[in-house]
Amino acid sequence: MAVPRGKVSRMKRGFRRSHDALKAQAYVEDKKSGERRRPHHIDPKTGMYNGRQILEPKSEA
């Protein structure tokens, strides 16, 4: 059975947990429309990604 070698100090525990913090989601400003969108995601309103039309634009019906 696995047994820990010794007590983990508060500092070492904190180093391990430092990557568990929640980070704010990144947004970039769209070059054409000026609206904010997630990077590396298709824009749902226009259907554009990386300057190419990927999806049909969302209709305002």
Image (cartoon, rainbow, N blue to C red):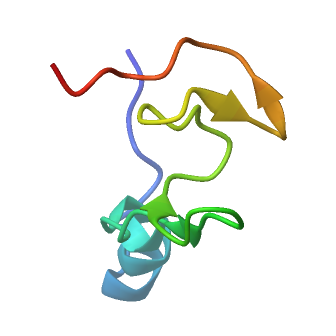
Residue nearest the observer in this picture, 42 or 61: 61
Task: Give the residue drawn at x 42%, y 36%.
Answer: 45
Q: Position of residue 19 (x, y in %)?
A: 47, 65
Q: Quadrant of the N terminus?
A: top left
Task: Give the residue drawn at x 57%, y 26%.
Answer: 47
- In-image side of 56 versus 2 (left or right): right
- In-image side of 23 versus 53 (left or right): left
Question: Image height check: is 13 above or below 40?
Answer: below
Residue nearest the observer in this picture, 33 or 8: 33
Q: How many marks?
A: 0
Q: Position of residue 58 (x, y in %)?
A: 37, 22
Task: Give the residue drawn at x 58%, y 69%.
Answer: 28
Residue nearest the observer in this picture, 14 or 56: 56
Q: Position of residue 25 (x, y in %)?
A: 40, 63
Identity of the residue furthest to the left in this view: 61
- In-image side of 34 versus 24 (left or right): right
Question: Image height check: is 5 above or below 45?
Answer: below
Q: Quadrant of the C terminus?
A: top left
Task: Give the residue drawn at x 84%, y 40%.
Answer: 51
In terms of image quadrants, where is residue 33? bottom right
Residue nearest the observer in this picture, 2 or 54: 54
Question: Image height check: is 60 above or below 33?
Answer: above
- In-image side of 46 versus 8 (left or right): right
Identity of the residue furthest to the right in this view: 51
Identity of the residue furthest to the bottom in this view: 11
Q: Position of residue 55 (x, y in %)?
A: 59, 13
